[in-house]
Image: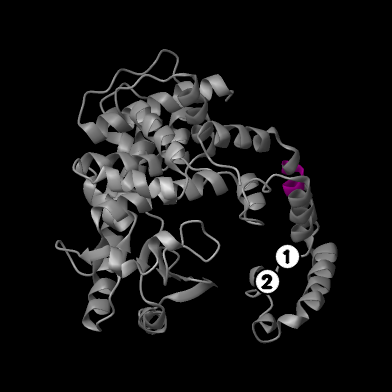
Amino acid sequence: MDSKQTFIYGKYLSHLVASTLNNTVPEEPFEGIDWTQFFRLAEFHNVIALVYPAIKDFAIPDHILTKWIYANNRMVAREARQDIEAQTILGIFAKYDIPFIKMKGIVTKHFYPAPYMRAQADIDLCVSEENRKRCDSILENLGYKLFASIENTDEYMKDNFFYYEIHSSVYDSNSDFRSLFADPFSKAVKDKNGVGYVFTDEYFFLHLITHLYKHFVFEGCGLRLFCDLYIYRKAHPNLDMDFIYNTLSDYEITEFYNSITELTECLFGDKDFDQKSTDIATYIFNCGDHGSDTIRRLTNITNDKEKSFSMKNKLKFRLQIYFPPAYTLKNRYRILEKAPVLLPFCWIVRGFSTLFFKRSAIKEQQKIIGTLNSEEILEAQRIQKLAGVKQK
């Protein structure tokens, strides 16, 4: 779809999401809507279950409605399985006196009309550094495998279905927001509706804002994070906004917050789109739930937003395609765990293996590098500036 079409379809998608969130009657589909494309866009943004209540009585082609019903039922079943598993794990952590803070989706889902409407890929918990090993032991005994461990986060998976991220800090050491959530338990209270802790209302809201900012800047994001912000603010009308604005000012993201608040009201409220909100919304509709691979690859190399898209960083990106850092190769070459000095040797082995046995991988690498010349990068720069992201 071109930009104009993307905006038309995305605007209607956000309208249907809003009708579910606000329990209002949705408008009829626009003339000429392609339901196949529209279904794909809803999938792309992971809002199938949020849109289904709004479209289920429309005159939709049977094969699309069948797909929608099936996808919606899967979300219901997925949430039920995740909830049962979460109750087990959180109960065990509580039994063994491991304090934990519940973050993001496991909390926000309860502010939606139904928990299954808030899709969750994983469940995020924050524990103290000294309790990370204890969590590791418990999760291993429950059949989980550690598949990634990066600085402050251990990522676990079971049955290719259940995913848990155990954090010892809310943000890593390179994040602008590390200090905001230093000593996270001092910003949390016991969850009166369940076990464990949750951030205080103001800090939870700040976490939603900073988390959205991180995704927006470093990879792009779709509708779901804006839904979280909208539904949480709606459920908490008495937040201490003076404290929140002062905090945002300290981290120089007040302008960004004002932009996304305005956009959120356009998406799910009754504010009309102007040119600025139209441009940012179109960018978001194009990014989808998982963001942009091109932006993610570039910004992962450096946390300096101004240098993310520079020629030097593009060169660095190209080098990382052929000479990846040790942490990305540890699963493939276990020897790097004990002897990282052997990284150059692993590059050589990997190079020969790719050259003689994985020619398709070379084409894929070239394709990835080719994306660096995309207009997508220039558009991301323009949209970030438009949204008030400070360049440092």
Lateral position of residue 100 relative to residue 166, left or right: left
Q: Nearer the viewer, residue 90 or 69?
A: 90
Q: For the N terminus, which image quadrant?
A: top right
* Location of residue 383 (image quadrant): top right
Q: Report if residue 290 lies within the magenta region.
A: no
Choose the circle earlier in sequence order: 1 or 2: 1
How far apart marks 1 and 2 lie (CA) works out to 7 Å
Q: How is the image coloured?
A: one colour
Mark 1 sits on what residue? 324
Q: Nearer the viewer, residue 33 or 188?
A: 188
Residue 164, image quadrant: bottom left
Tell me the chief SS of the magenta region: helix
Q: Which residues are magenta?
A: 367-371
Give percent across and percent down for residue 111. Answer: 22, 47
Dot 2: what SS? helix
Query: Is disc 1 in contact with disc 2, using a CB cutoff of under 8 Å?
Result: yes
Q: Is residue 332 above or below residue 229?
A: below
- Identity of the residue drawn at 53% across and 32% down: 283
25 and 266: which one is in front? 266
Q: Tell me if residue 266 comes above or below residue 195 in the rendering.
A: above
Q: Within 10 angstroms of label 2, few (less than 14), some, or many (20 or more) residues?
A: some
Q: Can residue 374 be seen in this snapshot? A: yes
- In the image, taking residue 210 as reference, residue 4 lies left or right, namely right
Magenta-span inclusion, residue 370: yes
* Amino acid at dot 2: Leu
User: Which residue was labeled with disc 2?
Assistant: 329
Q: Position of residue 318 (x, y in %)?
A: 78, 54
Percent position (x, y) of residue 325? 70, 68
Q: List x then y, in percent, for residue 186.
A: 29, 68
